[in-house]
């Protein structure tokens, strides 16, 4: 056996991910040593309750509640506690004690990323966070390293497994949101409080991380436009399917080129995507990140976005990278914010839309609707009309075919979000529109 240098590895947290990381570090110790060029010695695991039952069996003497003492003298600190505090304080302590750090904490990086990266820069330490966006899927390293010589134009990601599971079942079973959510909670796909997932907060944190990396720009969480999926119902799913689309919760990070220069947009919302698009075939709780780069073209990264052992794979990859750097020396890659592009509000984005309206089934209504759209600089690509009969019509008492409610599904060409939203307000206020049923963006060219 090669006599490798020993590196002291401290683990903070032994929950779903941490316990698996600890187990793999011990199980594959020899192989990891060969890959890293150093023996990775797990010196301790900080938790809240040293006596709590763990997912895997680990030596009791590794556990401690004194994270600070564990951090001092460690070469690599792995933070898998989650949340902002005390994770932030421990990570800063680790960096300032000379350790390289590995974390899967998207909430922390999306809110305090610059502080943590600056602290690491000051002392020449490195922060690894492959598991912080899209779990097991390697996407941080491809953006940071493999595509470092290219220019990313756009990222479209399905980065939240819970919402993809819910939307996928609504699509395939025609089920309602609340029924699938209840089932997902029963099966463990959704938390008892599903807000972070269904309202898009989790996806927004990941979008902020991916956009910062892709566009060399600090993207604060507040700059990410966010909408969740709670308003999506079975009839919207049905209409989407009928038009050849599927509804997915997408994190879209986009480079915009305007006359005034380049800027970026980062947004999370449910959007229609063509059934032929690769993202449409991401089923269940899986994640995928579709990257469009100037030279590389289209790339797609697909796999498990969560899960203890799956996420542990990404964490261990980071630990091996950290160990290699420790052995080889040299400065870390650091966080690039050189471009610092302005981040524009969602109103400045142009996309296609599908607008579904309930209108009076009267002659001239379509012309009125078309006029309002055209005045608002929204050009129509497709229109489909279905008539829902009144009771009188159904029993044959109406005298003519008019007087019911017609449903108009209008597909638009690309329009400015601000123009579109003002136009929809005007449609809603017009005498001919009974109800704006839905307005959905269409993504994916
Ligand atoms: P978890 O199951 O809730 O485990 C958290 C662990 O941290 C527990 O062992 C807990 O100790 C410990 N801990 C929490 N607060 C602590 C404190 N104040 N002091 C000491 N220890 C503390 O979390 P997880 O699901 O493994 O997630 C860990 C991180 O990975 C999070 O940042 C999460 O966002 C990220 N992540 C998770 C997944 C996933 O599939 N689970 C996927 C991607 C990323 P006790 O056990 O004693 O309570």
Image (cartoon, rainbow, N blue to C red):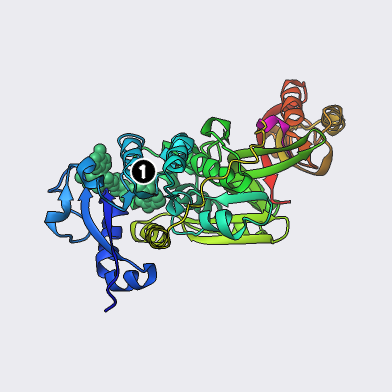
User: Which segment did they paint magenta?
Assistant: 345-351
Residue plotted at (40% across, 49% down): 104
* Rendered location of residue 301, percent (x, y): 56, 60
Residue plotted at (82% across, 31% down): 373
Residue 109 drawn in magenta: no
Closest to the observer: 214 or 158? 214
Q: Is residue 183 above or below residue 402?
A: below
Closest to the observer: 52 or 316? 316
Q: Is residue 33 above or below residue 69?
A: below
Q: Quadrant of the N terminus?
A: bottom left
* Local crowd size for mark 1, using a 10 Å CA cut-off: few (<14), some (14–19), many (≥20): many
Closest to the observer: 372 or 435? 372
Quadrant for residue 348, please give it: top right
Residue 347 drawn in magenta: yes
* Rendered location of residue 349, percent (x, y): 72, 36
Q: Is residue 91 visible?
A: yes
Quadrant for residue 282, please give it: bottom right
* Rendered location of residue 419, percent (x, y): 77, 29
Q: Is residue 276 visible?
A: no
* Rendered location of residue 48, percent (x, y): 19, 42
Residue 413 in the figure: left or right of residue 55:
right
The residue that mark 1 highlights is 95
């Amino acid at each position: 056996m090669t006599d490798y240098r020993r590196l002291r590895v401290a683990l903070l947290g032994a929950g779903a991910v941490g316990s698996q990381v600890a187990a793999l570090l011990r199980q594959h110790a020899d192989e990891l040593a060969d890959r890293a060029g150093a023996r990775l010695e797990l010196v301790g695991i900080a938790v809240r309750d040293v006596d709590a039952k763990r997912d895997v069996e680990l030596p009791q003497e590794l556990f401690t509640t004194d994270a600070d003492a564990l951090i001092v003298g460690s070469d690599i600190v792995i933070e898998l506690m989650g949340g902002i505090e005390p994770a932030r304080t421990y990570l800063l302590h680790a960096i300032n004690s000379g350790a390289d750090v590995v974390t899967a904490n998207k909430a922390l990086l999306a809110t305090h990323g610059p502080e943590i990266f600056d602290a690491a820069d000051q002392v020449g330490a490195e922060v690894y966070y492959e598991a912080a966006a899209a779990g097991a899927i390697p996407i941080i390293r491809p953006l940071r390293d493999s595509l470092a010589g290219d220019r990313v134009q756009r990222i479209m990601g399905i980065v939240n497994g819970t919402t993809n599971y819910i939307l996928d079942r609504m699509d395939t079973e025609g089920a309602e949101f609340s029924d699938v959510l209840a089932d997902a909670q029963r099966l463990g796909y959704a938390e008892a409080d599903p807000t972070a997932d269904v309202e898009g907060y989790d996806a927004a944190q990941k979008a902020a991380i991916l956009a910062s990396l892709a566009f060399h720009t600090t993207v604060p969480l507040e700059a990410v436009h966010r909408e969740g999926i709670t308003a999506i119902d079975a009839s919207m799913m049905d209409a989407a399917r009928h038009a050849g689309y599927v509804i997915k919760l997408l994190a879209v990070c986009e480079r915009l080129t305007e006359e005034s220069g380049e800027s970026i947009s980062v947004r999370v919302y449910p959007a229609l995507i063509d059934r032929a698009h690769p993202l449409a075939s991401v089923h269940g709780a899986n994640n995928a990140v579709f990257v469009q780069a100037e030279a590389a073209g289209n790339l797609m990264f697909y796999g498990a976005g969560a899960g203890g052992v799956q996420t542990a794979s990404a964490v261990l990859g980071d630990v091996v990278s950290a160990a290699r750097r420790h052995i080889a020396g040299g400065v870390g890659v650091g966080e690039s914010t050189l471009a610092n592009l302005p981040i524009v509000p969602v109103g400045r984005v142009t996309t296609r839309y599908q607008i579904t309206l309930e209108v009076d089934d009267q002659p001239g209504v379509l012309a009125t609707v078309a006029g309002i759209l055209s005045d608002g600089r929204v050009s129509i690509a497709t229109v489909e009309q279905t008539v829902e009969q009144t009771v009188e019509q159904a029993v044959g008492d109406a005298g003519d075919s008019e007087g019911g409610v017609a449903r108009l599904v209008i597909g638009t060409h690309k329009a400015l979000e601000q123009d579109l939203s003002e136009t929809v307000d005007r449609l809603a206020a017009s005498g001919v529109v009974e109800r704006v049923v839905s307005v959905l963006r269409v993504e994916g060219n």
